[in-house]
Amino acid sequence: MNGIRRIIRGAPAGPLEYHRRWPLRLILTGTLIFLYTPIFALIAFSFNDSRRNIVWHGFTLKYYEKAFANSDLMLALGNSLTIALISTVISTLLGTLAAYALWRFRFFGKAAYEGVLAMPIIIPEICMGVAMMMFIARSGWPQDLPWPLNLGAITVAHIAFSFPFAAIVIRARLESFNRELADAARDLGAGEFQVFRDITLAHMLPGIIAGGLLAFTLSLDDFVITFFTSGPNSVTFPVKIYSMVRFSVSPEVNAASTVLIVLTIVLTAIALRMQYRSQMTASPK
Amino acid sequence: MTQDQNDPIIRVEGVCKTFGSLRAVDNVSLSIQRGEFFALVGPSGCGKSTLLRMLAGFETPDAGRVFIDGRDMTGIGPNRRPVNLVFQSYAVFPHMSVAENVAYGLKIARRPHDEIAARTQEALMLVKLDGQEKKKPDELSGGQRQRVALARALIMRPAVLLLDEPLSALDAKLREAMQIELVHLQKTVGITFVIVTHDQSEALSMANRIAVMHQGAVRQIAGPAELYEAPNCRFVADFIGRVNLFEGVAVPHKKGRLRIKSEVLGEIELDGQGAGAVTLAVRPEKIQISREAQTQEDTIQVRGQVADVAYYGGYSNIFIDAGAGPPIVADITNTGSAGVPRFLPGEWLWCSWRASDSLLFRD
């Protein structure tokens, strides 16, 4: 009752109630508008019954039909999903192994390895892309392979930049592991591998799933590196959208982009939920 | 393989362990008999946990050997030793149910399913957790998690059960109840228990035999009563229970008698030999408090003023300022009528005790 009355009467803002002061509200509103208006506009106009993206003419799903009927676009979507799937499996595996090795063992050059591991994250993507393109061209990577082998170059590039992300997420998860759990399993007769399989892996699992989903979304919506490593026969979804925009910004592009946004949001939400749950179940010390 | 039942179940010979520049365990030798409830006590950092971890196999001694059940176990991993450890954090596997936790060791040992099921039930009944099989650890209280850890170790039928500060995370009431329960449990299963604790009263109330450790070395190994009544050094006297310490200088007097000069006690006579700096110790409950001086023979007494009275219900600690040194502590039981303080701060009193109740240590 008191709370309601305070809101109605407009009681003065408390010392920590920054959200009730106008400068902060203004900044917040501005930020939200700049961040989300373009995205909402993009999604809204994918339902616009007009060839131009300027004036609202009424609701339609025909651009989705058109997008899904566009065989080039669908081929690109298939390519993207294939690349994302393969690179996720491999980069999650590599990330898990790298994270476990860094957590469990002491070895020569460990600090250097940990630094190098983060390189693909900090190197500008455009440089990564150019480097990858030159590497693929110079290494005599076979061209004109049948599907899906023609996606090999992109997949390798995607694994290279996404596995460090997976490794870092999994490494962070391992930090909350109570080593006494591993000791307890050893004490009960488990060997090194059994401890890993029964105890450590179970603890890592939410991190592995989160890392995997992160790798998947990174691969799915990557443009820059993919652009440099894709050939005419290995176009991915983001690269295809880019080439469509170069001709005209039709609602079909909006529809295709919306599909990509929804895919990414859903996967990111699952990844965040996994990470949240993994924090909740972190073993009490 | 048949071992004589009189052989010690654990024999530690000249074991050393150094971490960096710290001598955690310094040339420790001890034997633990079958069926004993053995306690390792000492202040934190005295090396008792390191010694326990060497018994469990988590640490390898730098020197010396560890025998368990007659076999040399030095350098053998924790997964291949006939001992099990109850961890301080309990280390209950959070992703497994109570029953899965308890059954884990037997599953690793590839025992048949029906044997695992039967022994899990048995172990859970032993720690009174039957009916909770399906619960996950986060649904259990601290005390229940500890029971899971106990059952999980006992199901392996170890030659020795090691317990690392098992009661330190429990609240006072539960801790007392668990002390009694652990003693009963040990009698029921007949397994040798080795417990590490920093709490000397816990060790006194539970163990048959106690090793007091200090700076990596064992200072005394004895039963609780002997440890309390006849400590072999000033450190043990001070660590086990409460004690009043008086420093002085001894000179030989008559045959078998010493004369000790002390700032607080003045000049007193005691049975004993030798000479030099000594510490005289007396337990608070041995001290009589009276308003008049005592007249009996062989009584040490000192006059002082009551500084504080700490009331604990059934008994009180009286702190008496005897002019020099820290206040003398005396215990009195509150058997008189309720609410009537027997002694008040500021009052002048005599503290007295039989000379034979004094403990004498050469520094």
Image (spheres, coloured by chain):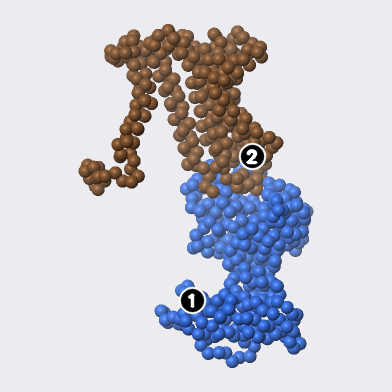
Chain colours: A brown, B blue
Q: Residues within 10 Å of mark 2 (few under 14, many from 20)?
A: few
Instruction: Work out whether residue B263 or residue B279 is closer to the camera in this orientation and state it.
Output: B263
User: Is residue B348 in view?
Assistant: yes
Query: Circle 1 is placed at which residue position?
Result: B308
**Amino acid, disc 2:** Arg
Query: Are the residues under badges 2 and 1 in a single subunit?
Result: no
Percent position (x, y) of residue A154?
A: 57, 17
Image position, residue B315 (x, y; %): 49, 76
Q: Residue at x 39, y 15 (%)?
A: A254
Residue A60 appears anywhere in the view? no
**What's the chain of the residue with tag 2?**
A
Task: Please determine whether, in this image, residue A143 is positioned above or below residue B303.
Answer: above
Regarding mark 2 in the picture, which secondary structure is present there? Answer: helix
Say the numbered circle drawn on residue B105.
Answer: none
Q: Report how far apart the C-alphas of labels 2 and 1 lie in the structure.
A: 55 Å
Residue at the front extreme?
A23
Is A235 left or right of B300, judged from the image as shown? left
Q: Residue at x 64, y 11 (%)?
A: A142
Find residue A63 and report its horizontal and vertical position in percent: 37, 12
Which residue occupies the foreground of this view, A93 or B107? A93
User: Residue B272: where, in percent of width, then height?
Assistant: 72, 82
Residue drawn at (25%, 48%), measured in percent from left and top?
A2
Residue A104's disc number: 2
